Every structure is written in C-alpha cells, then in structure tokens.
Image (tube, coloured by chain):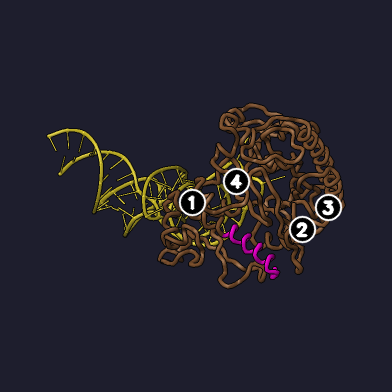
Amino acid sequence: MKILRQSKKSKARIARFSTPHGIVETPFFMPIATRGAVKTLDIEDVMSLKPTVVLNNTFHLFMRPGLEVIKKAKGLHTFMGWQGPILTDSGGFQIFSLGARKRAGVETEGLVRLKDEGVEFRDTVSGAKHFFTPEKIIEIQKVLGSDIMMALDVCPPYPISHEGAKDAVRMTTEWAKRCKVQNATADGGVPLEGGKKYKGESRRNMRQPMLFGIVQGSVYKDLRIQSAKELTRLDFDGYAIGGVSVGESWNEKKKVIQWTTPLLPEDKPRYLMGFGMPEEIVASVAHGVDMFDCVLPTRNARHGYLFVRRPGVRAWQRKSFYTAMHITGEKYRLDMRPVDAECPCLACRHYSRAYLRHLFKISEPLGQRLATLHNLQFYLDLMRELRAGIWSGSF
RNA sequence: GUGGCUAUGGUGUAGCGGCAGCACAGAGGCCUGUGGAGCCUUUAGUAUGGGUUCAACUCCCAUUAGCCACC
C-alpha cells in the first residue's frame, strides 16, 4: 500500500493499494451485499454509485447458493455481475450474532457451537450441519474469488468478562495463524481473469487475493494491545478492528479505536468492521482508519430512514453535518420538495418527499430501492468528500 | 310481511355480571462485519333508548341497521 497523503491536522490519510480487480483509494466505504446482492438494488444501480469495494459474506454464500453454483459461474464476480473488488467477510460475526440471538431468547438451539478447531453451524432451512474451520473458510473465499479475504475470528458479545474476551483473543490469534498457513500453502480457487501476475507469482493466471487479520479484545486495553501485536507479527495484508459496534457506547468505541490504530502498521490498510454512523466514520478516519462497512445506510433506507446533508457544512466541521429524515412522517404528506435538492441520486433527481412517503405507505418496493440509492449516495459522497478534504489539507 | 341471527376502535375480530384484549390501518421512535420489508411505543371502541342489578359490553325490552330463511 502506498500512502499518497497524510493529513497534517489528524491521522487521516489517503492511500492506494491494488486488488485483483483494480486499484482502490482510501478511505472508502463498502456497501453490503451479504448474500450476493445489495438489498433492493440491481447491479447497474450499484455500479451507478461507483463504490470502491463491495462486501459479501462467505458463510451466507456457502450456505446458499453453495460452492457448486459459484464454481459453475466461475466465481462470485461473474455470478453477481460486479467486476470491481470484493471483500468477503469470514462468518466470524455470525458466530457472535447467532450467540446473541440465543441470549435474546430466539430459537437457535444447536445452531452454533464454538470449539478450538472451528465452529459448527446448523442450517435453519435444511437442518444440515456444517463445520467451519479457519482453513475451510479460506478455501471457500478462494472459490468465491474474493479480492480481500477475512480471517475467521471470534467476535465476542458485549458486555463480556475480561476472561471471556481474553479467550476470544487467544482463539482469534490461533485461527489467524491457521488462515495464514492455509492461504500460503493451499491451491484452489477460481482463476481471476485479466490480472497481471505479481512478482514471484507461481499460480498461473491467478492473482493472489489479500488476507486481513482481525483484532479483537472487546473494550479491554491490554487485550486490544495483545491482539494487535500477535496479529501484526503474522504479517497480514491488512488489519481489521473487529468486535466493535456490538452494543458499546460511542466513548468505548472511540477508546478501542484510539488504542488499536497506532499499533497497526502504517503501510497496511486498516479496516473498522461494521462501522458506523456518519459522524463515527468521520472521527475514525481522523484516527487513521481506511475502510468501513455498515448495514445502516441500506437497512435504514428500507425502514424509511434517510440521511440528509445539512447544506454548507463540511463533514468534519460539525458532528451534526446531517439530519435524519423519517420519510413516512405525516409532515411529508404534502411536501413536494426532493429529499435533498443538492443530492444527485435517482430519488432526489426525479421524486418528491410526498411521493417517496406514498411509496413507503403502500409498501411499494420502488420506495426501498430509491431510499437505498439515496443513503448509499450519502455514504459514498461522504467518503469522496473526506478524501478531497484530506487532499486539500482541510481535513 | 313473518321468523331467526347479528351489532365491540377507521377496518377485521376476541371477551366476560366486576380494569374491554388482539391484528391491520394511523402517529412517533429504534436498527452499526444484515439468518429481519424487522422491533418498540402510542392514538382510537362496546349501534340508540329504556329496564334488572351494588355493578351491564355481557341479562331483559324496544328502536334502528344489516344478514339468512320462509311467504
């Protein structure tokens, strides 16, 4: 990774690194297409937004449609029609997420069992058992044709005892080592077309995907430090901060970022997983984070929650550089203005608030699509603005 | 016309001689590596008039309206 510019006012930086499907510039936000689709959007919608990288989920895609289908399609890129870079999350979060559901009293009996060797999942649809190991997760990600693979980690719930968090760090490091070994020794995967060979590349016509390690440690400083040190010794292509935004306060999240980012190598991408609200992203970029992903813009869009910029306010100037618009609100019934007159998205170019409200009120799918386009436009424009701000030296 | 049945928020429905619940719709809010078009909060009702009873949405009578059967 090459750092092109380092902000003088903060730890924010602009960097470039190459993936098998193109060169990317940081900081960037990845729209989420867990199961191979950004919910409600088609691929031309996605392309029109010009995202840097799109995120998919290894675990979900392995369950459905399964590797046989992906192989037949010659990889996930072709299968979903996206030719830009893809980051595949490993499924570590699902271990947590299903555990959390279990605590919440939702029926997950026997759905997930965590062991040192790996994790056992039961498919709720077919009832079939699957045992995922760090090695297997890497192999699956290679078959998917991922550009950026994530190591399998253990993402503990919040709150958790120091002892429990320590155990999660221990397993995460062990699994990270095994992912690293598997990635270095194993063949397999789908040939990535069109890429040039790396120096020393032995696998013909196949460019190597990147592999990221994931720092854990919950809200405990010593554990975050320990985890970051253990992982950086393994020399990954990039590092993620995981286990954040699972229920902590913003103050706690900020501390985790402040402890962790200085320990991650300058010349490797830093990825804050599952983040976040717009102001949290801005603050995190200022701490030197390069990559983000979050369900908020897409999920909130489907529930009629739109992000709207406050005119004339730069993102780093004020925490309240945007407002939330609940488009189903009665106050928009007769409001013929666009959601945001300055927004270039499809929704704002052609439709009024009243029309959008109407679509939501009658549950017309177009409403969710327009809202999703709008919110992603907001997030991606925010990242473009941050990059420009770092370039100009104003952020 | 005769007999029977029914009448509960905007809509569709529970209920019991002792605080009238539920669903949808309405209003407000929540969602942070998506197993969710999901979750929370909230507004709003016993057709009308009498009677019995300490107490009636509940039992009785009448009125009105609707439905069914018969003529």
Q: Are marks 4 and 1 on the same chain?
A: yes
Q: Are marks 1 and 3 in contact (CB under 8 Å)?
A: no
| Residue A84, numbered label | 4
Give coordinates of residue A201: x percent, y percent: 74, 37
Are discs 2 and 4 both within one chain?
yes
Residues marked 3 and 4, same chain: yes
- What segment is highlighted magenta in the picture? A378-395
Which mark's residue is nearer the viewer, 2 or 4?
Answer: 4
Residue A387 belongs to magenta span: yes
The brown-tinted chain is A
Question: Chain B, which colour?
Answer: yellow
Earlier in the chain: of badge 3 and badge 4, it is 4
Does residue A352 sit above or below A221 in this rendering?
below
Name the amino acid type tagged 4.
Answer: Gly
Chain letter, disc 1 residue: A
As helix, strand or loop, the secondary structure at mark 2 comes to helix
x and y percentages locating residue A189 in the rendered image = 67, 32
Q: Label 2, on which residue?
A: A252
Q: Secondary structure at mark 3?
A: loop
Mark 2 belongs to which amino acid? Glu
Which structural element holds mark 1?
helix
Q: Which residue is mark 1?
A: A369
Badge 1: residue crowd in 10 Å (few <14, some 14–19, many ≥20): many
